[in-house]
Image: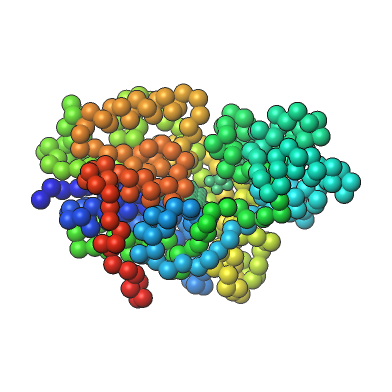
Amino acid sequence: MEKVIVVGAGLSGATIARLLAESGKDVIVVDKRENIGGNIYDYYDKNGILVQAYGPHVFHTNDEEVFEFLSKFTEWNEYKHKVVARVRKDKYVPVPFNLTSLYSLFPLSKALCIEEALKTEVGEGNQIPILELRKSENPLLREFADFVYKYIFYIYTMKQWGCKPEQLGQTIMGRVPVKVSNDDGYFSDKYQVMPQKGFTQLISNILRHPRIKLKLKTDLKKEIALKDGQIYFGGRVLDGTLIYTGCVDELFDYKYGVLPYRSLKFKFQTLKQSSFQPASVVNYTTSASYTRITEFTKFTCKPKDSTVIVKEYAVNHKKGRNIPYYPVTTGRNKVDYDKYEQEAKNYKNLYLLGRLGTYRYLNMDQAVKNAINLFAKIEGEEFDMSTIPALKKKD
Ligand code: FAD
Ligand code: UDP
C-alpha cells in the first residue's frame, strides 16, 4: 500500500489526511509541536475557559463545501465577531470603520456631510478599501480617508508588519474595508461560527480515523532529504506521497533565500474579574506596543468570575527561534516563493499545502478549500462528502 506522509497537523494537514484516509490511503501525520491543530490549537484552562494559544480565531466562510466538510466533525455556536479600535483613552469605535465610528469621532454636521458623500461615491451599504478611498477626487472624502488611515490603519499596520499600509497593498488592507453602513460585524460571510468544543476537538475529530497515524514532537525535516527529483525518507527513496504544510524555504534548505514571515509574541493574563474590555478583540490603533488584546471569555459567551486576556505583539520571524505566522508576500518575496514552487514541481510525489507551504495569507476556510482541491488533484476526482458519516453526538 502506497504511503502518504503529511507534514503538519494543522487544519490543512488534518483535512488532506482525512480526505485521503477516507479514500483508502494509509496516512502518517507528523508535527513537530506537542499538540495538534497548528495555529488553531486551543485548550481549557484551570477555570474552564477556552483559550486560543496562538491568538484569536473565528471561523467564517461563504463556501458550502468547506462548511459541510467541517460540520461532519463539530457542532457550532453562532458567533458574530465584533472588533473595536481603541483610538484614545475610553474611546472605542467599531472596526471595520463604519457610520457608527464616523458619528462617534466627528462633529455631527461634518459627519452628516461625510455620510452623504460616502453614499454618493461608494453607495449605501457598500464598502471600500482604505487605500482606494484615499484616492477619491472629493476633497472631503480624501480628508476623511486620511483621518481613518491615521487613526485606524497606519500605526496598527506599522506595528503588525513593520511597513506602511500602501507597501502591503490591497489584498491585505482590503480585508478590513470602510463600510457605508452601521454593520458592526468584522466579517460579512454567510457562516460565522465557533466549534462548540473548540478547534482542537475539531481537529482531533478530523484526525480520528483508522487509516491515520499521528506522530507529534517529530520534525520531519530532520528525516527527509530532497535530491534530483527523489524524496529520501529515513535514508531510502520514499515510495509514496509527501504533503508538506511547513515552510517551503526550510524544506529546500533556503536555496533561493529565506522567505520573510512575521511572528508574534503572546502575553497571557488571568484576571479576577468577569470582564476586561468592551469586545472580544480590541485593536490598539493609535497607541501601545501590542497590536490587540483578545478576551477569550467573550467568545464563549458564558460569563465567569475570572477572565483571560492575551496581548499580541508582532515581531520579525527568526528561523528556528519563533513561529512563522504571516507570510510577507510583498516585493520580491513572492518571486522568490515562485522559485520554490517551481523547484517543488521537480518532485512528482511532493505537494505543498497550507499557509506556510503555499506562502499565502489563508483564512481557515481557504486552508480547508485548498486541501479539498489538492485531494482532487492527487486522486483525479472530486471528493464525495456524503461518504463521511454525520457527526456522532459524543464527539
Ligand atoms: P499551521 O496552523 O501553521 O500548521 C502547520 C503545522 O505544520 C504546524 O503545526 C507546524 O508545527 C507543522 N510543521 C511545520 N514544519 C514542520 C516540520 N518540518 N515537521 C513537522 N511539523 C512541521 N483564520 C480565520 O479563518 N479566522 C481567524 O479569525 C483567524 N485568525 C488568525 C489569527 C492569527 C494570529 C493567525 C496567525 C492566523 C489566523 N487565521 C485565521 C489563519 C489560520 O490560523 C490559518 O488559516 C490556519 O491555521 C492554517 O492552517 P495550516 O494547517 O495551513 O497552518
Ligand atoms: N488593520 C489595521 N487596523 C485595524 C485592523 C486591521 O491597520 O484595526 C490592517 C493591518 O495591517 C492588518 C490587516 O489590516 O494586518 C488585516 O487585518 P486582519 O484583521 O484581517 O488581520 P489578522 O486578523 O489576520 O491578523
The colour scheme used to paint the residues is rainbow
Q: Could you tell whether 392 is left or right of 133 in the image? A: left
Residue 378 position within the rendered picture, expressed as x and y whole percent measured from the top left: 23, 43
In front of the other: 181 or 1: 181
Residue 383 in view, yes or no: yes
Residue at 42% x, 31% y: name it.
259
From what the image shows, is residue 330 above or below residue 278? Answer: above
Q: Quadrant of the C terminus?
A: bottom left
Residue 343 found in image quarter: top left
Residue 128 position within the rendered picture, expressed as x and y whole percent measured from the top left: 65, 40
Q: Residue furthest right?
A: 109
Residue 43 position within the rendered picture, expressed as x and y whole percent measured from the top left: 44, 64
Residue 31 in view, yes or no: no
- Labels in figure, total: 0
From what the image shows, is residue 223 above or below residue 164? Answer: below
Residue 62 position within the rendered picture, expressed as x and y whole percent measured from the top left: 48, 53
Residue at 48% x, 32% y: name it.
329
Residue 197 found in image quarter: bottom left
In front of the other: 270 or 12: 12
Residue at 18% x, 35% y: name it.
231
Residue at 53% x, 39% y: name it.
315
Q: Could you tell whether 151 is left or right of 9 in the image? A: right
Q: Could you tell whether 267 is left or right of 83 in the image? A: left
In front of the other: 230 or 116: 116
